[in-house]
Each structure stands twice: as structure tokens, then as C-alpha cells.
Image (cartoon, rainbow, N blue to C red):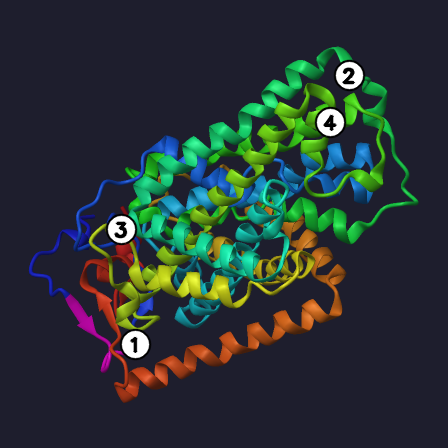
Amino acid sequence: MQKLSQTANRQPTVARGEDSGAEYVNIGEVTSPRSVKVKKVAILPLIFLIFYEVSGGPFGIEDSVGAAGPLLALVGFLVFPFIWSVPEALITAEMGTMFPVNGGYVVWVASALGPYWGFQQGWMKWLSGVIDNTLYPVLFLDYLKFAIPALGGGWPRLLATLALTIVLTYMNYRGLTIVGWVAVALGVFSILPFVVMGLVAIPKLEPSRWFEVNLHDVNWNLYLNTLFWNLNYWDSISTLAGEVENPKRTLPKALFYAFILVVLGCFFPLLIGIGTLPVNRELWTAGYFSDIAKMIGGVWLGWWIQAAAAMSNMGMFVAEMSSDSFQLLGMAERGMLPKFFGKRSRYGTPLVGILFSASGVILLSGLSFQEIVAAENFLYCFGMILEFISFVRLRMKYPAASRPYKVPLGTVGSVLMCVRPTILICVVLALSPLKVAMVSLIFVVIGLVLQPSLKYVERKRWLKFSVSADLLDLDYSTHGGADTLMQ
């Protein structure tokens, strides 16, 4: 069937003051519109953007050993990826190629459950991403304070946090291609010292240390949150799929290679660190890998890993902000947010989305590390439940829709694939501290109220909303939706 996306005579935008019956139903070949022609992201930068959105290396995984001991830490980073990461990455590959547009999971949920729930997905995931991004300037300075003690607290630290946020935000403003290649450079610099450490440590390895376990002394909350924090966010790359070169082929490949990089990047350093030195669980906290490196290879290797950790935090910041800001742009292109959120800079980047995301980072930077990790995981879990439901619902509702990459499972298999990560989500939510759960639920309630409030603003025409005409045939239709799903 000929695609409606080939229709001529388009209008640049469709005002949203009057139309209200649009629903997300159509799937086609259209990608996100842009008024500025910029180079799209190739597969290598895309791999490292995913790497940084998910993990960024082994920095921060040390707590898994402190919480659960050597064996459970190693098993966790081998087994957890297949319980959580593989299903999430497979869903991202299928849905991201089915909807190769900016906005990603917002479009998936809106297409399956309607615009209201699409907005809730966008609100929770954006907030989770912004909360996550507050960590990275702080962690960067935590590594830097060993060389510059004045950055340990007070006004110097506050000003340095603000300055670093501004610099990294400006990098996002200058273009996604730049961010992608910076991610490649930072990734190589961050991974190499662990390769060197592994080679130096080979003669000192004692495999018996890998099997130490005490099931009566496990901090399950810290253990699961550490695994979850270091192995999630695979779907974040979907929000900028419209900026990717040939996303229907590139995205699944990039997710596959990034999965290998993430798992090896966490498991290999743990294997070396545990197997080389006697395990003292109290020492296994964030930053301990630099101490291990000093004991294995000398001061120079320890400094290299400290520098790599600092650079990794920069990479995670710019990758996360890219996803967050392009998500807001994609929502604006679909009339979910005011039109000004869809404004692009001369470099093709979402100007207002970047500014809003950076402002959120600054406002939330006072949270503690543990509160940030728990809060972002809590909100992220709610968003993932909507994604799982949407994935299954679209399989059932539109079985003949074009899926350039399709998870090789039927409907029953797709449901079963989502069962294990859903059980894990329930466990993570159940283990969340009461304070974090209450604050997170308040944020959820804000989202439930915010969407109808924005619709009221739209009806009153206090702010301008519009749906991009280039997206009409992809996402919106008031009639005949099911037929346009067929190739």
C-alpha cells in the first residue's frame, strides 16, 4: 500500500487551538522534521552514546561488592543483563525502528495507550533523566577534589558545579554529532586503563576469591539499586532516533554492540579487582577502583583511572542531556508541549529543551547520591511498566505493522519476556525508602495534573501548540488509522 507520507501539498504546522480528536495510530517512514540541515549520527558515535546513557564504565559498581560480596557481585553483572537489559534493549530495537522519530518511548506509549499516557511517560522519563544527570557534575568534582582540595565543599564547589554544567550544556547546544564523537573519545580514554590493569594483574590473580559469598550479610536494596542503576536506560537512545543515520538498520546494531561493551566494561574490572587483592567489603565503595589500580600497577595507573572516572561522568552528562532535550522536542512536535519546546538552534539542537534540562539539573543538585539513585530508579520503573504494556499492546493491536527489526517472539513470548523485568521492577519499588517513594509519587501526581492543565492552556490559547505537518501521517489520524499501518 502506498504510504501517505508521500502525499504532496503539506502545511508547515497545524494549529492545535481547534483540533482535539487526534490520536497516535499511524506508522510510516517519516522522520522528525527539521528546519536546520545537520549531519546525522553514525553507528560508532551511537554505540558510545548508548554506552554512556546506560553505564559509562565500571565507575560506581564497586558498591555491589560492598553490599553483597564477590560472588553475588560477579553473578549480578552476568545475570542481571539478561533479566533486565536484554528485554529492554530488544524492545528499544523493535519500537525504535518502528517509530524512527524524536520522542521515542513517548510516541510508543501514545500510539498504544493514547496521548494522555504518552505525556505521563514523557514526564516521568524526563524527570528521571534530569535527576540522574544531577549526579555527574558532582561525581566529576568528587574525583577532581583529590587534586584540588578546595573543590571538596563550600562556594568553590558550588561555583565549579555550576560552571561545569554550563560548559557541558554548551557542548550539547553545539550539536549531537559533536556530542557523539566526544563520547567516542571519552569512552576509549575511560576503558583503556582497565585493559592495562587487567594485563598487569594476570600473574596476581587468585580465582578462589571470586567465589566468596555470605548470604546472611547482603544489603539487597543497595545491591539491586547498584545493578539497576548501572544497567538500565537502554531506551533513552530512542528519544533522538530522528537524528540517527538510517535508524532502522543502525539502531539495532548499535544496541547489540553497546550491550557487549557495557557488560564487559562492568564484569571485567570486577573480575580483576576481586581476583587480585584480598576482599575487604568495607573498602568497596565508589572510587575504589583507583585504589586497586595503584596497588596493582602503581600511582600512574591509579591517576589514570581517576581521570577516566571524571571523564566518564562528563560523557554520561552530555549523553543523558541529549536524550532528555530531544525528548522534549519530540513532544512539542506532537503538540504535547508548547510550540517553543520544538525550537532548534542553528546547530539543529533543541534549544529550549537543553535549557530546561540544564535548569532541572541545577535545581535538583542538592539531593544526596543515594536519594538521586533511588528516586530516579523509582520514576524509571513506572515508565518502564508503561513501555512493556505498550510493546505488547501494539503487537496485539497492529500485528501487520511494519517492524524493520522484530523481536523473534510471538505475542505470548513477548508477554513472557516482559514478566521477569516487571517482577524486578516490583522488587525495586518495594525496597525503595519511604521518603523517596513519597517524593516520587508526588512527582507522578504532578504529571497526572500537568497534562490536563496544558490542554486547558491550549484551549484558552495562552500558549501556542502545534503538530508538525511532517509528522501527521506518522503519528496522527482521525480516521482510517489501521489501514495506514500496513506496508
Badge 2 is on which residue?
205
Residue at the extreme right: 216
Residue 208 percent location from the top left of the image = 85, 21
Q: Amino acid at mark 4?
A: Gly
Magenta segment includes 352: no
66 over 397 or under it: above or below: above
The residue tagged 1 is 21
Q: Position of residue 317 (x, y in %)?
A: 48, 49
| Mark nearer the N terminus (3 vs 1) | 1
Report, in whole angstroms, how far the alpha carbon at label 1 lies from the one at label 2: 65 Å
For label 2, the crowd category at 10 Å Cα-Cα, with few meaning under 14, some 14 to 19 and many 20 or more, is some
Pinpoint residue 256: horizontal percent, then vertical percent.
48, 32
Label 2 vs 3, first from the N-terminus: 3
Q: Using the image as rendered, state which of residue 301 and residue 484 is in the foreground.
A: 301
Q: Residue 433 location, x and y as percent? A: 75, 65
Dot 3 crowding, Cα within 10 Å, few <14, some 14–19, many 20+: many
Q: Nearer the viewer, residue 433 or 109?
A: 433
Q: CA distance from mark 2 to mark 3?
A: 54 Å
| Dot 1 or dot 2, earlier in sequence | 1
Q: Amino acid at mark 1?
A: Gly
Amino acid beneath label 3? Gly
Q: Amino acid at mark 2?
A: Leu
Q: Disc 1, disc 2: CB below 8 Å?
A: no
Mark 4 lies on residue: 273
For residue 390, say whether it is visible.
Answer: yes
Q: Is residue 59 above or below residue 477?
A: above
